[in-house]
Image: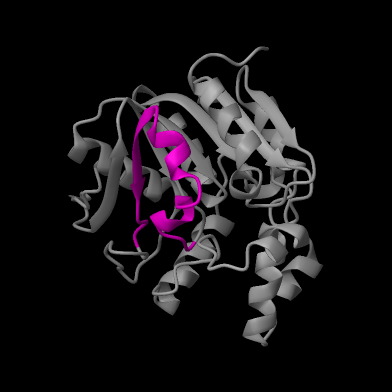
Amino acid sequence: MGAMPTATTPDGVALSYQVRGRGHPLVLLAGQANSHHWWDGVLADFERDHLTVTLDWRGTGESGKPDEPYSTRGFAADVVAVLDDLGVERADVYGTSMGGRVAQWLAADHPHRVGSLVLGCTSPGGRHGVERGQEVRRALGQSDRAAAGRALLELMYTPAWLAAHPGPHRTVGDPGMPAYARRRHLLASAEHDAWDALPRIAAPTLVLHGTDDLMTPPANAPLLAGRIPDAKMILIAGARHAYFEEFRDYAGPVVLDFLAGRMRS
C-alpha cells in the first residue's frame, strides 16, 4: 500500500503521511529538516511485520509549511493528529535524531498512544544533554556549502560506507524545504528539553546509539536509558549518526526483536 493521505492538525496544518505494510502499527519518525524519505533505505525491513506509518514533518515534503515557531512537543501533537486520522489508537514508535526527541514527548504526553518505544541517536536536550562539539558546529556552519554538505555526510556515515554508496543520500535534509522552515526545525531541535518528563515514560523503551556519532554524542544514550524506567540500551560499535541505514543488518533485527518481545535482558 502506498497511499499519501493527509491529516489536519488542530491548528489547521495539513500533514502528509504514508502507510505501508501490514501488522501492528509502527510509527517511524525522521530527523530534523527531513521528510519521510529519511527512512527509504530501511523501510522494507519493517513493513514485512508492521503497518508502517511515516510522515512529512510540518515544514517538509508535502506537508504544510507555516512560518511560525515549531517545537518537538508540538511535533508530537502532530503525530497524534496522524494517528487520529488513521484511526490508530496505539502504535509502537521508533524515533531517530530529532524524531527521537519528538518520540520522548509522544510517550510522556500521550502514554496511551505508545506501545513500545525505540529512541535512536537522540538526546534528552536541555542542560542535561551532551551537545555536539564546536568543531562539528563549525564544519556544518561553514560558508562553503559544498564543504558543509560533505561534513554532514561524514557525520552520518563512515568513509568506507560513503565510498561504496555515492548517493543520492536521503538523510541529509529535504532539498525542497524553505530556508525559514529549516531554521524553525533547527531551533525546535535545539530547544528540546524533555529531562523532567522522561521518568513519566511508561512504554518499554530501547535506546540505540552509534559509538562514533559526533552529531549527537553517544554519551546521551546512557542519560536517556538511566532516566526512563527500565529502559534497555545498545551501543553499536563504529556507527555514526545514520546507524540505522549503514548498520541496517544489525540495527533492523535488533529493533524488530525488541518490538516483538524477543530481546533478552
Say which residue appears at 50% left-offset and 66% top-offset: 173
> Residue visible at 50% across and 51% down?
41
Left or right of 73 on screen, residue 225: right
Image spot of residue 199 (x, y percent): 57, 25
Q: Quadrant of residue 163?
A: bottom right
- Its colouring scheme is one colour
Quadrant occupied by the N terminus: top left
Q: From the viewer's side, name the closer residue of 262 and 145.
A: 262
Total tally of numbered discs in the picture? 0
Report if residue 197 is visible in the image. no
Position of residue 42 in the picture relative to residue 121 (left or right): left
**Nearest the eye: 76 or 255:** 255
Image height check: is 90 above or below 35? above
Quadrant for the C terminus, please: top right
Q: Residue at x 47, y 70 (%)?
A: 182
Which of the two residues, 93 or 52, is positioned nearer the viewer here? 52
Residue 110 visible? yes
From the top left corner, tell me how far across and down residue 245 is, in percent: 59, 48
The range drawn in magenta is 33-58
Residue 15 x/y as whole percent: 26, 55
In the displayed structure, 15 sits above or below 25; it is below
Residue furthest out toward the bottom: 144
228 is within the stretch colored magenta: no
Q: Quadrant of residue 65?
A: bottom left
Residue furthest toward the front?
A: 164
The residue lying toward the viewer, choosing from 78 and 200, is 78
Residue 139 drawn at (x, y percent): 74, 74
Q: Residue at x 44, y 35 (%)?
A: 46
Q: Does 37 lie within the magenta span? A: yes
